[in-house]
Amino acid sequence: MRVALLSLMSCGSCAENLELACRRTGHELAWSSLTDDGEVPDVDVLFVEGAVDFEDAEAQERLERAVTSADTVVTLGSCAATGGFARHAIGMREPARYHFTVFPAAKFAGTDYAIPGCPPTEDAIAAFLRALEEGDEDRLEPYRVLSGDFHGLAPDLPAPVRGPELEVEDVLLTSNKDLCLGCDLDVIERDLFCVGCGTCAAACPARAIELDEKPEVRQERCIRCGTCFVVCPRSFRP
């Protein structure tokens, strides 16, 4: 597959891991905004990393043009998928509950899949590329759900931001409160879904999850990146 990368407001770690994953899986990174100022050529998959400032019309227009060049659009990393660190800790402040200037790239363009993580690992990206190439819908389902629908967001709303909406019958491990993708303990304890394996706590880039038989999310540290949701072995029914 021919792959392109559009890098917006980001640290670049997602882009680095994407390049490594493409080398491993044999896919061609045909274009990257980090090395080319031109328009995105026709490609099979466009990865978008980074958040977007709501007042940056130029970045929004560039994103809207870019998505027309690809058959599949994927938000790469939590800044692009949910706002992540960029949304909840702007200017290196302590994580705040709301920030109405910076939004995930997913707000401004239709996306097919999202790979959260801060950053998503080379292994995670390579696994996604293999599933996409093989058309494995079961393995792609978590990424599709996490792409969500952010188009209803507005910068002046006082209410919590909403992201992917999930049915408990389909997804076992998310509360989706205020775009939090951490554990809904009422659900997992009542139905015994959580096995206390600690995978979520080990994977959390913000060290926001502690394990005491069941995971406990420290909301003041959580950056809403969704990493715990993706790595949990019980998050989706087999």
Image (tube, rainbow, N blue to C red):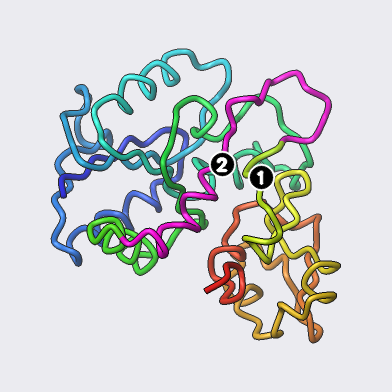
Give the residue number, with chain letter if any, for mark 1.
Answer: 165
What's the residue type where badge 1 is placed? Glu
Kind of element beneath mark 1: loop
Magenta residue span = 136-161
Q: Is residue 127 magenta?
A: no
Of 103 and 189, nearer the camera is 189
Where's residue 32, x and y in %? 23, 38
Give me the disc on residue 148.
Answer: 2
The image quadrant of residue 133 is bottom left
Q: Which residue is located at x 72 percent, y 50 percent?
A: 176
What's the residue type where badge 2 is placed? Gly
Of mark 1 and mark 2, the one earlier in the sequence is 2
Q: Which residue is located at x 42 percent, y 47 percent?
A: 76
Kind of element beneath mark 2: loop
Measure the alpha-carbon separation of dots 1 and 2.
7 Å
Q: Is residue 159 magenta?
A: yes
Of 8 and 172, nearer the camera is 172
Q: Is residue 69 left or right of residue 183?
A: left
Q: Which residue is located at x 60 percent, y 46 percent?
A: 84
Marks 1,2: beta carbons within 8 A = yes
Where's residue 4, x and y in %? 24, 40
